[in-house]
Amino acid sequence: MGEYAIRKSDNSDIKIGTCDNMYYLRMEDKDKVDYDGSWKNAFFRLPFSDEDDILPGGYLDYNRHVVLYNFECKECGDNPGTTQLKSNHGMLLNVPCHHGEKLPENTGDIKAFFNGKGPHYALYRIKIKDNKIIGLFGCMECGEKWTIPLEEIIDNVYDKELKARLQKYL
């Protein structure tokens, strides 16, 4: 369900998100809109500095995120998602995604292995919960998402400008 608001600066009707995900609104910009809904469960867009001149509702990449380097979430690997692999000739395989924490089990003709291993998690949005900032992070492969207190994940944000902005919330 789309969430809409009136942007105060020009009285425009804008989309700010879908359900609890405010893809098009940063936390610090919520006073720039008139919104009839509740902010109670809302996850807000990350405050990227190169988007400072964009008005609420005007962001192009709705799901912009930041990669979390050297972040491990062992319990996430115990809750697999599903990813689909495809070949150039049309073969599709649905396999469990353990979010880079472990590989799917080898079965019969199918063998799983890593060909190098990069970061698997990203920080997508933030919210206020019980007067603390919570991060919404997830697996970049299958899309599974979890929450975590921001202070437990912020050291894995390597974008210095974004990290400094996020630290102001702590």
Image (cartoon, rainbow, N blue to C red):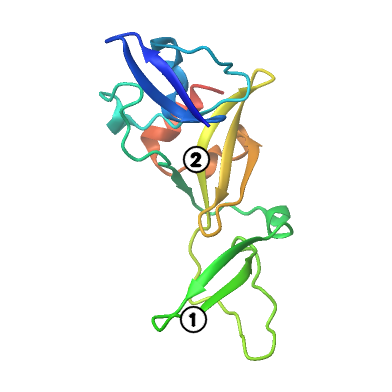
Identify the image quadrant of the C terminus. Answer: top right
Mark 1 secondary-structure assignment: loop
| Most foreground residue, 157 or 60 | 60
Callout in the foreground (1, 2): 1
The residue drawn where x is 40% and y is 26% is 15
- Mark 1–mark 2 distance (CA, rounded to whole Å): 31 Å
| Most foreground residue, 108 or 49 | 108
Mark 2 secondary-structure assignment: strand
| Amino acid type shown at disc 2 | Tyr
Query: Measured from the top left, where is residue 60 in percent x and y?
Result: 31, 37
- Sequence-wise, the earlier of marks 1 and 2 is 1
Name the residue that disc number 1 marks.
91
Location of residue 109 (image quadrant): bottom right
Q: Is residue 131 above or below residue 112?
A: above
The residue drawn where x is 53% and y is 57% is 120
Query: Seen from this angle, which residue lies furthest bottom?
Result: 109
Name the residue that disc number 2 marks.
124
Q: Is residue 118 above or below residue 116?
A: above
In the rendered view, does 147 fall on the left or right side of 34? right
The residue drawn where x is 57% and y is 48% is 138
